[in-house]
Image: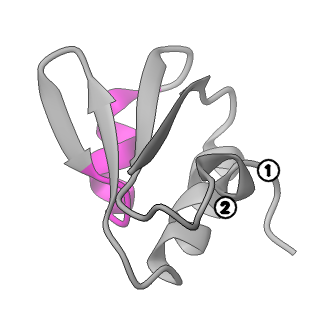
Amino acid sequence: MKNMFYTFSTVEEMVAFVNKAEACDFDVDICYNHLVIDGKSLMGVMNVGLGKPVEIVCHSTAFSPESLIGKAA
């Protein structure tokens, strides 16, 4: 399990993140305060909102959460 902290700044960035997370064959979670949200759920990720620091958790030892951040290709 690997994690990182990140703050989403645009809706497009959130959509690109969820698209990349959906392609993963392991769980991806977004943690905000006491909430744990499925990272593959666009509604869940957007519910957190922009500009709030979240923790991205990848339930894989071979995959880095940094590769989920950025624009979709």
Query: As displayed, is residue 45 above or below residue 39?
Result: above
Q: Is residue 44 magenta?
A: yes
State left or right for residue 66 relative to residue 18: right
Q: Residue furthest front?
A: 61
Q: Residue at x 38, y 51 (%)?
A: 1
Which image quarter: residue 37? top left
**In the rendered structure, are the residues bearing label 2 and label 1 in contact, judged by CB atoms less than 8 Å apart?**
yes
Q: Which residues are magenta?
A: 38-49
Query: As displayed, is residue 20 above or below residue 31?
Result: below
Q: Which residue is mark 2?
A: 16
Disc 2 crowd, CA 10 A, few/some/many (<14, 14-19, 20+): some
Residue 10, given in percent of the width and then of the height, sits at: 68, 35
Along the viewing direction, whichever of 18 and 55 lies nearer the viewer: 55
Residue type highlighted by circle 2? Ala
Q: Is residue 70 magenta?
A: no
Which image quarter: residue 32? top left
Residue 28, given in percent of the width and then of the height, sits at: 37, 59
> Which quadrant holds the C terminus?
bottom right
State left or right for residue 16 relative to residue 70: left
The disc placed on residue 70 is 1
